[in-house]
Structure formats: structure tokens, C-alpha cells
Image (cartoon, helix red, strand yellow):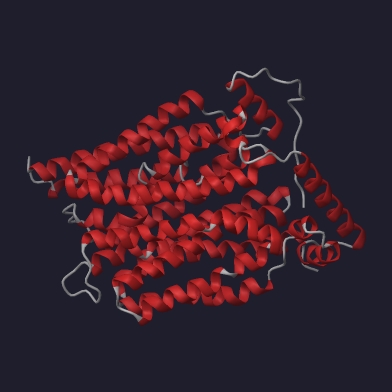
């Protein structure tokens, strides 16, 4: 008999693989945009059109998180997750069969719609089907698989044709069409919709045990849903309730620092940045692959140490280190632009600064943001807040991608990096002042500390109380 944990790891790996598909679509742009803007390109596009191709992914990403949440509540998590398969297949087929700037935009919009579903529903599904002891490890697959997908595109794109790259990228959604068909529906969602017998059937696919054990698991699900329903809060609480409002402020400080501070830019423009830096040690494509490896390795490292060192120290180090790295990159490009002296012999400085940013961003602002998000919002509004937050993140990412191109064209790339440095350093100051530590604390204790931060008197509560959520 297969153990419960092994079943959950296998299901978790299958669902986390959707993040690899998202990473391949996201990473596709960095090496391909340089090729498409060359004189012998299969699709002639300008730099401004290229920025819209890159940004269109985030435009599509905006529209699906909140509707996907409502739809999955009504019809189930599994069909909503599986819906990304035909969408991805259509998108990659458009890239294979057409040679049009408009079709590039449409395909990228479709990929964005898929990513909005993946980011909002897949972690929710994994949280519902996994046991608390292994939930952190399984959900951490998502970030790791995202970077594996990005690194795959970075590594393959420079050495194959445009069509071959698309065929390789379409292979993963094709496999997912079969894999996702066999994943169970979330018993939590089925109980929420009153389908108790079906919930028992699906629970047997996730847990190993006799009928009594399965029945007890379903009872725990019912109790968790009853508790969540009792604590439910209106959408307006995000603005009107002081604790909810403070939660939003804290998570937005992290999101703005990370996304407007360069994470989306580095994912999409890494090859372009390196190609303009007069690097002699290796090609821009090879440099992008190295950056992808750094992102992947450090994302694994972060998932291993986040419960040891805490959220707040890693976020402070991440934001401060990112700010210093961008400052150095800005100085490099300023010296290059003003021709103060020949920087080609010092390209290692830019590589050090760019690699440093990838290291610092990967130990905090990237992987810890969703962890902090899952802990800081009150239970009664967590789903609404999470969907709203993901949508807002897409807006931030879209704004960052377009503004980076605009500032580069009008003021110079060095000014862009100095602005990114200012955002990260300002974010680190705000985090130092306002951010609370959530490591090892129950949701009750976290909410009490938020009340203190909001200058609301702390209610009496057992600080040793723990909140378990077992499915």
C-alpha cells in the first residue's frame, strides 16, 4: 500500500508542474526578444513592440485570479486547474503556426490567463489536500518548478530555432493533459459544496487508511469549513478593518519592493541587459542561463532556511542587498554611457552586481512573499485578500516591465537601475519599521501583534495556542 505522504508528494509534484509550464512561458521572452528584434528575424518587431509582447503576459495575468477563485469554489479545483491545458496548447500552436506580431500578443495574453489560474488555484489546492507536516515542502515545489521552467527556456532558446523552442515548450502542457486528468478533486472543496460521498472517495486517493480514518478526516474538513464560515468577513474589511488594512499594507510593501524593484524585469529582460553591457567573459545568452541557475539554486535554499532564520531577517537582507546590487549596476551603466573610461575590462563588476541581485532576491523577496501572504491575513478574508493581492501583483509587474523600457529609452538604463535601487532600499527601511516576524507563531498570535501595531488593545489569548488546519 502506498503511504499517504507518498501519495501527496506525487500529487503535489504533478500540480506544481503547472508552475514549470508557467516558467517556460515566462522565460521564453528573455532570449527570444533579442532574436526577434534582429535584422534576420522571422518576425520583425521594434523594441517598443517587444516590450508589449513581454508585458502582454502580465495583462492576461490580471483577469483570471479572482474569477478562477469563484469558479473553483462552484465547480471544483480540478477542472479549473485542468483548463490551463487547452489554453496553453492554443497559445503555443499560435506561435508555431503564425508569424505575426499580433499573434505574439494574443498567445502571450493566453499564457497570462493560464498563469493567473496557476498562481491563484494551484497553491490553494495543494494547501487543501496536504497534511500540515509536509505542506510547506510540497507547496515549495511551486517556486522551484517555476524556476526550472524558466531555466529550461533560457537554456534551450539560444541553440534551437524559433519553432523547435515552441515544440519543446508545448510538450509539457501535452503531458499535463494526461497527468492532471488523474489528480483527485479537493475533498475540502467537495465538502464545501455538500458532496460528502464524493469527498470520501477522493480522500481515499490522498490518504491511506480504513473507512473510520477516512470518515474522521472528512469530519475535520467539516469542522475547518464551519470555523472559516463563522469567521467570514466582507470584502470591504480590507479597507475598513484596521487589522486587515495593516495586513494589506505589510504584504504590499513586500510586493512593491520585489516587483517594482526588479524581479519581473530581470526575468524578462536579463538577456537584453547583459547584451548591452559589453561583456567579454561569455555571451548574453550564457549569462542569462547562469542567472537562471542562481534563481533556481537559491529558491531551493530559501525553502530550507525560511523556518530556521525567520521571514523578517531574510526579507530585510533581500531588499537591502538588492538595492546595493542595483546601485552598482547603475554606476556601471552610467560610466559606460558617459564614456568616462572603457568598461569592457570591468564587465565582471556588472556580472557580480547582477548575480548579486539574483542571489538576494531569491533568498527573500521572491519565495517568502507567498509564505508571508498565507500567514498575515485573517482567516475570514484570506481567500478574497489573496485573489486581490495576486491581481495587484500583476498590475505592479506590468507597470514595472513597461516603465523599464520607457525609462531606458528616455533617460538611460543607468537611471532605471538607480530607481530600482531606491525602491529596494526604501522598501527595506519600511520593512524594518513595520514588518512583524511570523516564524513559529500561531495565527492568533500574529493577529494579536497586528492589533498592537494598529494600536488596538491586545485581547487576552494564550500565546502558546496553535491553529492547525488538517484535511
Is there any visible trace of residue 180 in the rendered image? yes
In this rendered view, identify the residue nearer to me: 32 or 275: 32
Tell me: residue 468, above or below residue 34: above
Residue 420 placement (x, y as % from top left): 31, 39
Res. 325 image quadrant: top left
Using residue 139 as the reference point, say whether residue 194 is left or right of it. Answer: right
Q: Nearer the viewer, residue 157 or 29?
A: 29
**Image-quadrant location for residue 56:** bottom left
State the residue at coordinates (46%, 26%).
432
Quick check: 43 above or below 221? below
Q: Residue furthest right?
A: 212
Q: Residue at 68%, 69% (x, y): give it.
A: 183
Kindly tell me whether residue 298 is visible in this rendering: no
Q: Measured along the vertical axis of the image, is residue 247 above or below residue 140?
A: above
From the image, which quarter does the N terminus lie in?
bottom right
Q: Position of residue 203 (x, y in %)?
A: 80, 62
Identify which residue, 405 or 200, lies in the foreground. 405
Amino acid at each position: 500500500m502506498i503511504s499517504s505522504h507518498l501519495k501527496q508528494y506525487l500529487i503535489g509534484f504533478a500540480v506544481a508542474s503547472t508552475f514549470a509550464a508557467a516558467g517556460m512561458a515566462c522565460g521564453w521572452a528573455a532570449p527570444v526578444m533579442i532574436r526577434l528584434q534582429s535584422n534576420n528575424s522571422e518576425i520583425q518587431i521594434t523594441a517598443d513592440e517587444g516590450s508589449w509582447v513581454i508585458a502582454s503576459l502580465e495583462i492576461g495575468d490580471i483577469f483570471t485570479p479572482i474569477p478562477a477563485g469563484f469558479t473553483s469554489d462552484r465547480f471544483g479545483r480540478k477542472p479549473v486547474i485542468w483548463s490551463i491545458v487547452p489554453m496553453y496548447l492554443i497559445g503555443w500552436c499560435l506561435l508555431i503556426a503564425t508569424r505575426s506580431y499580433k499573434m505574439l500578443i494574443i498567445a502571450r495574453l493566453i499564457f497570462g490567463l493560464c498563469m493567473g489560474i496557476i498562481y491563484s488555484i494551484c497553491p490553494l489546492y495543494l494547501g487543501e489536500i496536504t497534511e500540515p507536516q509536509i505542506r510547506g515542502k510540497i507547496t515549495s515545489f511551486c517556486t522551484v518548478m517555476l524556476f526550472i521552467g524558466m531555466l529550461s527556456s533560457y537554456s534551450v532558446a539560444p541553440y534551437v530555432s524559433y519553432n523547435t523552442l515552441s515544440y519543446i515548450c508545448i510538450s509539457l502542457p501535452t503531458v499535463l493533459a494526461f497527468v492532471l486528468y488523474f489528480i483527485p478533486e479537493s475533498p475540502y472543496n467537495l465538502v464545501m459544496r455538500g458532496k460528502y460521498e464524493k469527498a470520501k472517495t477522493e480522500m481515499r486517493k490522498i490518504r491511506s487508511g480504513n473507512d473510520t480514518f477516512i470518515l474522521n478526516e472528512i469530519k475535520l474538513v467539516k469542522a475547518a469549513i464551519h470555523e472559516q464560515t463563522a469567521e467570514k468577513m466582507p470584502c470591504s474589511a480590507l479597507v475598513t478593518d484596521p487589522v486587515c488594512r495593516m495586513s494589506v499594507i505589510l504584504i504590499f510593501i513586500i510586493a512593491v519592493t520585489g516587483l517594482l524593484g526588479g524581479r519581473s524585469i530581470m526575468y524578462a529582460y536579463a538577456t537584453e541587459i547583459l547584451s548591452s553591457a559589453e561583456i567579454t567573459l561569455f555571451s548574453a545568452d550564457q549569462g542569462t542561463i547562469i542567472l537562471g541557475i542562481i534563481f533556481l539554486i537559491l529558491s531551493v535554499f530559501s525553502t530550507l532556511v525560511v523556518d530556521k532564520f525567520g521571514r523578517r531577517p531574510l526579507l530585510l537582507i533581500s531588499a537591502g542587498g538588492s538595492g546595493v546590487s542595483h546601485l552598482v549596476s547603475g554606476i556601471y551603466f552610467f560610466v559606460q554611457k558617459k564614456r568616462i573610461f572603457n568598461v569592457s575590462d570591468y564587465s565582471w563588476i556588472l556580472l557580480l552586481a547582477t548575480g548579486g541581485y539574483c542571489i538576494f532576491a531569491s533568498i527573500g523577496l521572491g519565495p517568502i512573499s507567498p509564505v508571508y501572504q498565507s500567514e498575515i491575513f485573517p482567516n475570514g478574508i484570506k481567500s478574497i485578500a489573496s485573489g486581490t493581492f495576486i491581481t495587484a501583483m500583476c498590475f505592479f509587474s506590468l507597470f514595472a516591465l513597461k516603465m523599464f523600457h520607457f525609462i531606458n529609452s528616455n533617460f538611460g538604463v543607468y537611471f532605471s537601475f538607480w530607481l530600482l535601487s531606491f525602491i529596494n532600499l526604501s522598501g527595506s527601511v519600511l520593512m524594518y519599521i513595520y514588518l512583524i516576524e511570523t516564524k513559529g507563531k500561531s495565527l492568533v498570535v500574529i493577529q494579536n501583534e497586528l492589533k498592537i501595531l494598529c494600536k488596538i488593545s491586545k485581547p487576552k489569548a494564550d500565546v502558546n495556542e496553535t491553529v492547525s488546519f488538517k484535511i
